[in-house]
Structure formats: structure tokens, C-alpha cells
Amino acid sequence: MSKKITFTKIRRRNQFITFLVFFVLVIILFVSMLVNPWYKIPVNWYFIPVLGLVGSILIPRYMGRHYCGQYCPSGFISDSMNHKNRAGKIIKSGIFKPIFFALFIALFVVAFLPWDMGLPVSMTETYWDGVINKLWILWVICPFIIALPLIVIFGLTKGGRTWCNYMCPWATIGVALGKQQLEVNDNCNDCGSCLKVCSQPEVIEPVLGTGGKIGANCLICLKCVDACPNNAIQYIEKK
């Protein structure tokens, strides 16, 4: 008898594929940076961050935070940790989101000044000067270089999805542009099965037992859908 295919299995598969793609990209960029540090990465490489920037706006517009819950490569790491939410009031207050969002914008602006794109660097530079001058690459791989330490530290101490729920700049965009996607229907008897697996229970608690739309900050990881014994959580029907 075949095992039931759950949203959790699908999510983990998707996360692993995107994680693998990003990991390979990181290796290629670093090798390029170290092998030939005196020249900037060719202009055609810039489609990667530009595509990421455009995608960070368009994807939330049409998918909400579905990308965060199902495809984000950092989610592959986060979901491998204890999901239980132990974030305190300060983290839950949302104070970190605007800070990291501002950092995200600043990195993009500083690293991608038009007059600096793809131009050769003087051969009089030392090897490590050339390497340091390529630190704009950090923007491309920031999920691994900038965010990864925070993902791991907060994941181990406050719960696996703490970065995703309360700090990630892409989450800020997703919540601002996205729409509520899940709702609790009349089948809910407030048994609490969903809360046991949810990494951010405050977004679903208000509608348990009464029904209604789950908050827009929901990751759409769909763990709650798998856990609910009454099929009480479903996608909002588009009209």
C-alpha cells in the first residue's frame, strides 16, 4: 500500500531542489571571485539578483507567502529544526522586519551602482583588494552569507521559522503585497492539532472554532492542513 503524499513531503522536496540550486550558484560565484578577483563578474551575471528582485515583488503579488512556505531555500534549513515557537515579545513585535528590509535595500543600491557594473578593476590592486571589491556578491548569496547565521542562531534558540516569521525582508514584501490564502471553515472544533505543528500559532489562533481567514503573515507551509483531522483548513476560493 502506497504512503499518503502530504503537503509536508511536497514542501520538503521543493525546498531541497531550490536549496541545491542556490548552493551550486554560491560555489560558482565564490570560485569565480577567487580565481579572477581583478575583474568584476560579467554584466550578464546580473540577471540573477535582478530576477530575484523582480521575483520578490511579483511572486508575493500573486502567491502571497506561498514561496516562503514552499520553495525558499532557507526554509530547507529552518524546517529541519524544532518548529516550536519560542520567540519573545520583542521578536514578535515586528521591530526587526523594517531593519532587515532597510539593509536589504541598502545592499542592493550600494552593490549595483550602474557605473560599477561589469567594469574591470585596476590590475595594480592586490589579490585580496580585488576579492574585497567583489563583496557585492554577498547580495546575490545573502540567504547563505548574511541570513544563514541568523537563521541558525534564532532557529536553534527561538524556533526554526523565527527568521521567516519575524525578520526576513522578503516576508515584509510578501505580507505587504500578498493576500490571505487560507481559511478555517465550519468543520473546526478547536482541537488544537494545527497549533501543535504551526511555527507561528498567533496567525491561526484567532479563527479557531469560529472560522475565518488566517492572517496574511501565514507562511503557507500547509503543516496545519496535514495535521487537521477534520479538513477544516482550506485555500480561499477565488471569485
Image (cartoon, rainbow, N blue to C red):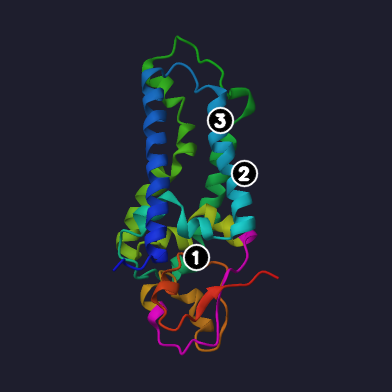
The answer to whether residue 149 is above or below residue 112 is below
Q: Earlier in the sequence, mark 1 or mark 2?
A: 2
The answer to whether 190 appears left or right of 211 in the picture is left
Residue depicted at x 45% and y 73%: 225
Q: Write down the region rendered in magenta.
A: 176-194
Instruction: Name the residue beneath numbered marker 2.
Output: 54
Q: Earlier in the sequence, mark 1 or mark 3?
A: 3
State the quadrant of the C terminus: bottom right
- In the foreground, 94 or 180: 180
The answer to whether 224 appears left or right of 177 in the picture is left
Cα distance in 3D space between marks 1 and 2: 21 Å
The answer to whether residue 188 is above or below residue 26 is below
Main secondary structure of the magenta stretch = loop
**Residue farthest to the front, as pictured:** 1
Q: Amino acid at mark 3?
A: Tyr
Residue depicted at x 53% and y 15%: 120
Label annotation for residue 46: 3
Residue depicted at x 52% and y 64%: 94
The answer to whether 161 appears left or right of 55 in the picture is left
Instruction: Give how far across and how far down residue 154 sits, in percent.
Output: 35, 59
- In the foreground, 98 or 48: 48
Instruction: Name the residue beneath numbered marker 1.
Output: 220
Q: Earlier in the sequence, mark 3 or mark 2?
A: 3
Instruction: Give how far across and how far down residue 91 sits, in percent.
Output: 44, 65
**Residue farthest to the right, as pictured:** 239
Cα distance in 3D space between marks 1 and 3: 30 Å
**SS state under label 3:** helix
Whether residue 40 appears in magenta in the rendering, the answer is no
